[in-house]
Image (cartoon, rainbow, N blue to C red):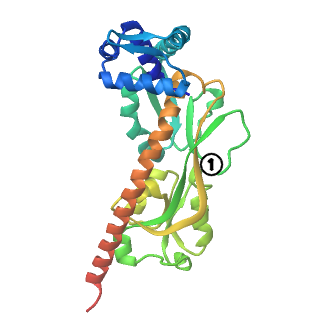
Amino acid sequence: MFDWNDLKALLAVARGGSTLAAAKTLRVNQTTVARRIESLEADLGLKLFERGQGGSRLTETGLALIAEAEAVERASQGFTHQAQALARGMAGVVRVTVNEVLANIALVPALSEFRRLYPGVTVDLLIGDAFLDIQKGEADVAIRGASVLPDSDLVSRKLADFEWGIYCSRDYAVRRGWPRVLAELNDHVLIGGEGGLVPLPAMQWMMAKAPAAEVHCRSNSLTNLMVAAKAGLGLAPLPRLVADIDPDLFCCLPIDDLPSPVWVLTRADMRDVPRVRAFIDFLMPHFATDRRALIERGLQTQAAVAGAIAAARQEEAPA
């Protein structure tokens, strides 16, 4: 194998007659051109140029290979032109159905960079906890959590595995304490689920582990569940990626051994539509980078919250 840049050096020297002329054409220094020619000759095990005072002249072997090198050059140019044509034609709307929490942590932070790369593509966010039917064309892409995907013709890619925990507000932890072991969960007030949040695995886990606990309110919105916990209304199951970075929330109990994969789904006939493919291919690595940063930030935030709660409880303790 050889580097395409070595072939470009070969063609430039052949056309210019010297490494100096080639360097000017390629806008690199003469030493770089000479090194690339030497590298190509070493890789091929062939002598391509005769070097003299007047410059560099192709050997018989070099002449025999020039036509093939020019064919590679034409293929490369064709590839570039085709890619540019696709980019120019990459316009239109990508409709994405997603809940508000995932939209806020996975999509919105990525959209400005995506728009910079693909200014002709508009992303419409269809935010809600209800599942739109992408098989019927209600959306182009769905981002949703599901432990097991049902059999269908949809094309899926895993965005990430999300971890969950049981959270309360800092104020609640200072006033009432928090469950330090699972058995103490029954002694606290819970925020339950309604509608689409009832089958949420983390919600079912919490309710099953604390059947005797008081439930003072319920919600059918994950965003509202977080607001209710921050208001001090009780304990609620929340995704750690978003709850850990909130300085008003405290993770009482992590929920271990409860994998919660999140998937990016689209129809088979949409996956090769340029704007849809570009959106999915961009989102996956972008979110992986954001996720690592959020986890690190969450660790730091939760350590600070735990310290603040401990200090506040110590101040309130009787002398």
Q: Which residue is rendered at x = 39% and y = 77% of the image?
A: 176
Q: Residue furthest front?
A: 53
Which corner quadrant holds the C terminus? bottom left
Q: Using the image as rendered, state which of residue 121 and residue 188 is in the foreground.
A: 121
For mark 1, what is the residue? Answer: 146
Asked whether residue 3 appears in the rendered view, the answer is no
Q: In this orientation, which residue lies closer to the viewer: 82 or 211?
A: 82
Quadrant of res 34:
top left
Q: Quick one: label 1, few (<14), some, or many (20+) residues within 10 Å? A: some
Image side of residue 63 versus residue 152, left or right: left
Give the quarter of the image for residue 300: bottom left
**Quarter that holds the N terminus:** top right
Pick whichever, 145 or 194, lies toward us: 145
Task: Residue 279: give x, y in percent of width and height.
Answer: 49, 30
On screen, residue 144 above or below 226: above
Q: Is residue 316 above or below residue 69?
A: below
Q: Up-down: is 29 above or below 216? A: above
Examine the image and state in which quarter residue 110 appears. Answer: top left
Task: Please provide percent x and percent y for residue 219.
Answer: 50, 55
Q: Give the left or right position of residue 263, taking residue 19 as reference.
A: right
Identify the residue at image location x=45%, y=65%. Answer: 167
Count the marks: how many?
Answer: 1
Residue 214 screen position, x and y as percent: 52, 72
Q: Amino acid at mark 1?
A: Ala
Residue 214 seen? yes
158 left or right of 80 in image: right
Residue that protrudes farthest toward the bottom in the picture: 319
Q: Residue at x 44, y 75 (%)?
A: 178
Q: Secondary structure at mark 1?
A: loop
